[in-house]
Amino acid sequence: MSSAATEVPESEGADGGRWSGAWRVAVALALPLVIVGNSVLLLLIPWHAELQYAVPGFPDPPTRFIGGERSDLARDGIVSIWPVGPGVRILEEARLQTGAPAFDADEVSHMSDVRGVVRALMVAWSISAIVLAIILYRFGLARLNRPLRVGAWLTLGAFLLVGLVSALAFDSVFTFFHEALFEDGTWTFPTGSTLIGLYPERFWITATGALVLLSVLQALFVIWWSGRSRMPR
């Protein structure tokens, strides 16, 4: 019998099949994290709030903000939750034009908690992106078309559901999200607080919509791209 008859193809056989199956599962689970991380990164641009402020119908700034003070402080708030950078120190040092501190201790503490959540998400995003890149390099796109499509469909279904529920009951979704990530009493603030003035409910409704839209578009692109790569040339 020739040796070719007994030769086991690379990554096949009992052990190879198990490893190949494990990598396919890893791809399907890593892709949603990569897509979510990409979307969050796009929403962390410093001028995100200013883009929303420019939309007609966005609530006017509180009278306590003078001139472009709201835009400047909103940029500081976004930069403060970046996983790298000055952190909440930028908020501790921020002052209104009157000389008063722009953020109180509770607001600074909450933004520090938010930064921790963003940092954890970015760590998960980085690991998932690295794992995905290694697996794609090792096995090739042709062998991972199906798990990529599975991951994309998982992402698409999850975010369509989030979008639907948010459209029907945004307050409930917003409360659930905060209760799951932050301790009670650390994320609610009076109407006249700086954080509420910078990021009112309208801000979060739009940001949630943008997050859903960005994630859905990425998932649809992966579905299209992986399907296109399967077409005969």
Image: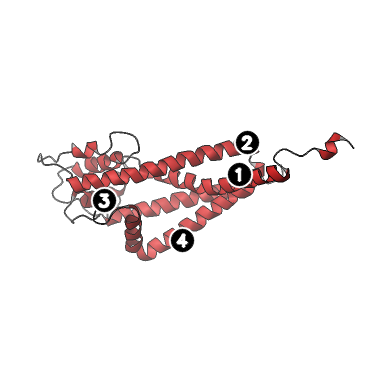
* Residue 42 showing in the rendered view: no
In contact (CB < 8 Å): disc 4 and disc 1: no
Amino acid type indicated by mark 4: Leu
Residue to which mark 3 is pinned: 199
Question: Which numbered circle lies on residue 23?
Answer: 1
Q: Compute the Cα span from label 3 to label 4.
A: 24 Å
Residue 224: give x, y in percent of width and height.
59, 49
- Residue drawn at (28%, 39%), measured in percent from left and top? 80
Query: In what element is the residue under mark 3?
Result: loop
Where residue 138 is drawn, which disc sits there? 2
Q: Is 138 placed left or right of 197 in the picture?
A: right
Q: Between disc 4 and disc 2, whose residue precedes?
A: 2
Closer to us: 79 or 125:
125
Whole-Å distance between the Cαs marked 4 and 1?
A: 27 Å
Residue occupying the point 48% across, 39% down: 127
Mark 1 and 2 residues: CB-CB less than 8 Å, in contact? yes
Image quarter of the N terminus: top right
Give the residue type at disc 2: Arg
* Residue 188 sits in quarter: bottom left
Provide residue 130's location: percent of width, then percent of height: 51, 37
Task: Check residue 161 in the rendering and tell me which mark sits there, or answer none.
Answer: 4
Q: Which SS class for mark 1?
A: helix
Task: Name the element at disc 4.
Answer: helix
Going by the image, does 208 lie left or right of 74? right
Asked if marks 3 and 2 touch (Cβ < 8 Å), the reply is: no
Mark sitting earlier along the chain (3/2):
2
Return the residue nearer the eye: 82 or 8: 8
Q: Residue furthest right?
A: 1
Going by the numbered disc 3, the residue's amino acid type is: Tyr
